[in-house]
Amino acid sequence: MPRVTVENYGTFEIETGKRLVLALEDAGVDVLHRCGGKARCTTCMVEVLSGEPTPMTAAEKTVLEAKGMFGQGRLSCQITCESDLSLRTIKTTTSTGLDAGTKPAEHIEPEPEYLG
Ligand code: FES
């Protein structure tokens, strides 16, 4: 099972293929997902410290480029847990005062088109 290490939280064993945003939330990590995991809001962005996340989806690239955030991190709603990762959260309910947002679906939305 992949292990995800989150700065200031610890290391968690995650079911292979689970959406990273849900894995984080289920592990008790304070992470936002304001658009419900649909690659629109970018609030679920995390900084990847080590490891190789799943390839970027077309939807992720589109929203990151539109908001001028390409290269600043990856959207945890557009990644599934396939191998070990180490990361740092960026926006949280604590740092923003916002509600986390609607719970994302189990599978990546929109239907992922991987850019490899
Ligand atoms: S972009 Fe909104 S939850 Fe990921």
Image (spheres, rainbow, N blue to C red):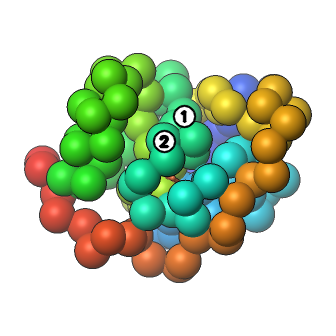
Q: Amino acid at mark 2?
A: Thr
Q: Position of residue 78 (x, y in %)?
A: 39, 55
Residue 52 in view in this figure: no
Lateral position of residue 69 relative to residue 103, left or right: left
Q: Any mark on residue 46, and which? A: 1
> What residue is shown with label 2?
42
Lateral position of residue 77 relative to residue 13, left or right: left
Who is closer to the viewer here, 28 or 100?
100
Residue at (38, 71) in percent of width and height: 109
Instruction: Assess disc 1: are there few (<14), some (14-19) or many (≥20) residues with their C-alpha within 10 Å of its C-alpha.
Output: many
Who is closer to the viewer here, 68 or 84?
68
Q: Position of residue 72 (x, y in %)?
A: 41, 21
Position above or below: 60 against 9: below
Secondary structure category for the residue under label 1: strand
Q: Is mark 1 within 8 Å of ligand 1?
A: no
Evaluate if marks 2 and 1 touch, with contact meaning CB atoms under 8 Å apart: no
- The part of the image, by quadrant, that contains residue 102 is bottom right
Residue at (67, 70) in percent of width and height: 103
Q: Amino acid at mark 1?
A: Val
Q: For marks 2 and 1, give the CA distance.
A: 9 Å
Lateral position of residue 58 relative to residue 90, left or right: left
Q: Position of residue 11 (x, y in %)?
A: 72, 42
Q: Is mark 2 within 8 Å of ligand 1?
A: yes
- The part of the image, by quadrant, that contains residue 65 is top left
Which label sits in the foreground, 2 or 1? 2
**How many labels sit on residues?**
2
Secondary structure category for the residue under label 2: loop
Residue at (42, 37) in percent of width and height: 74
Residue at (44, 77) in percent of width and height: 107
